[in-house]
Structure formats: structure tokens, C-alpha cells
Amino acid sequence: RQGDRIEITAAAKLPKGIFDVHVTARGPGDRQTDYSEPFCHKKPAVATTFREDGIMLLDGKPFFPLGAYRDPSDTRTDFAGLKEAGFNVTHDYFFEGSGRTATEARAYLRAAKANDIRVFLGFSRAAVRRGDTRSWKRWTGELMDEPGLLTWYMMDEPICQGIPQAAFVQLRQAIRQMDSGHAASLLLARISPVTEFQRAYAETCDVLWCDPYPIPGTPLSLVLD
């Protein structure tokens, strides 16, 4: 123990996996604090970093994402339409619903990787809204070693949904605790002109996406703006 920091070392070599760590601290006057956290003892399958010019690097090699939110003709594990169109990144809203399991997500990630497609994988929106840190950490820890994973997709258009910026500060911290190898991405509906309110959300993520929806009523220059 150093001040209010405690370092815990395993008594024996740990196998790969997720472990629950429980700490009870007792002080004078029968004061007691209980602490419980999951601990991830795995390595990311891919190390994600960024060049000075912002280009994403996967294991040190440049990667330019061409993403799609899914080809409606595909089933969850059929990526033929995406491959034919030349995409290399995709997503499925299915995993942002309640009750989705890591087993389902793992099958999806592996099917994507088998087709040379990577995934930006979301979290349960209900869990994000209620601040369920344990759920975020479990989800991240279970799936962080899948090679099909590209980024953790924190949320789609959080401002439009009324989810405060503080929720994504917490979520990013939870991701970092379990997985140091993947970026956290966030999408805002519009970022032009940039406001301090939008900037606060942007600072919670590693990758910021924007979907201004110019078609059909607005010039394409909206995207450039």
C-alpha cells in the first residue's frame, strides 16, 4: 500500500482470462470499505496506434478504414456484399441492444476477420445510459483479444440522445482499464461550426466520426465543412 493506492500481485502464474478482484479495507472505529473490480489478464490481438498525421496503425502498419454500417442484404455473419463493394470495416447495431452476449459478439468478430473485415463494436445503450461500469468492463475484457476488433464504438450521436459527456469519460476509462490496445470511437451528428459543447465530447475519444447527412437536401460541401 502507498497512500490510497494498493498494488496486488498474483500468488501464482495466472492463466489468460478475466478475474474478479475483491478488496476489503478496515480502519479505526470499525470503518470498512469494500471494493470489487474485474481484472483482465489478456493481451490485445492487435496494437492500435496513430501516426503524427493521424493515420491509424495496426501493429505498426498503416490502415485506412473504408466503413459501412452493414449491407442490408447480409445476415450478421455474411459479409459478401461488403467485400464486393470494397469495404474493410463494418458494424452491427444488434450488439447495442440489451441481453447481447460475448459469445454472440465473438462469433461475429471471427466471421468478420475471416472475410478480412474489421469491426467497430458497440456497447449496450441501456448499460451506457445507466452508467453500468461493470458491464462495460466485462464486455471489453471478454472481447479485447479478438483480431477482428478495430475500435470500441462508444455511442452513435450521443448529443441527439441526451447522454451527457461525463458518461463517455467514464466509459473510456473503463475501456482503458481492460484494454490498452484498441481505440475508442464516438460519432457526432454534426461538428460544423465546432462548439465547446461538441469539443467536450470529442475529447473523450480517440477517433471522432461525423455524419452530417447531406443527401438529399444539402450540398455535399457540408461534409467538407
Image: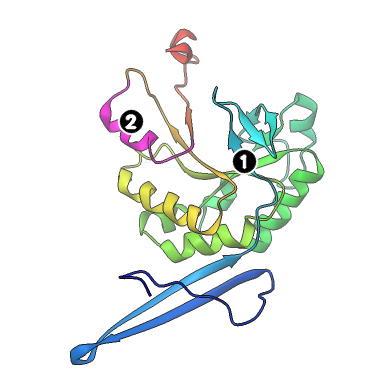
Residue 90 appears in the figure: yes
* Placement of 160 over or under 29, stated as above or below: above
Mark 1 / mark 2, whichever is N-terminal: 1
The quadrant of the picture occupied by the N terminus is: bottom left
* Residue 41 as seen in the image, left or right of residue 24: right
Viewer-closest of 225 and 30: 30
- SS for callout 1: strand
Q: Mark 1 = which residue? A: 48
Q: Mark 2 = which residue? A: 199
Q: Quadrant of residue 2?
A: bottom left
Callout 2, which amino acid?
Arg
Q: Quadrant of residue 43?
A: bottom right
Q: Quadrant of residue 29?
A: bottom left
| Residue 7 % position (x, y) | 45, 72
Callout 1, which amino acid?
Thr
| The magenta stretch spans residue 205 | yes
**Label 1 neighbour load within 10 Å: few <14, some 14-19, many 20+:** many
Eye-nearest disc, 1 or 2: 1
| Residue 95 % position (x, y) | 57, 52
Viewer-closest of 26 and 183: 26
| The magenta stretch spans residue 118 | no
Residue 100 appears in the figure: no
Viewer-closest of 68 and 24: 24
- SS for callout 2: helix
Residue at the extreme bottom of the image, as rendered? 30
Residue range highlighted in magenta: 194-206
Checking the image for residue 108, the label placed there is none
Residue depicted at x 81% and y 45%: 114
| Residue 38 % position (x, y) | 50, 70
**Label 2 neighbour load within 10 Å: few <14, some 14-19, many 20+:** few
Residue depicted at x 50% and y 61%: 137
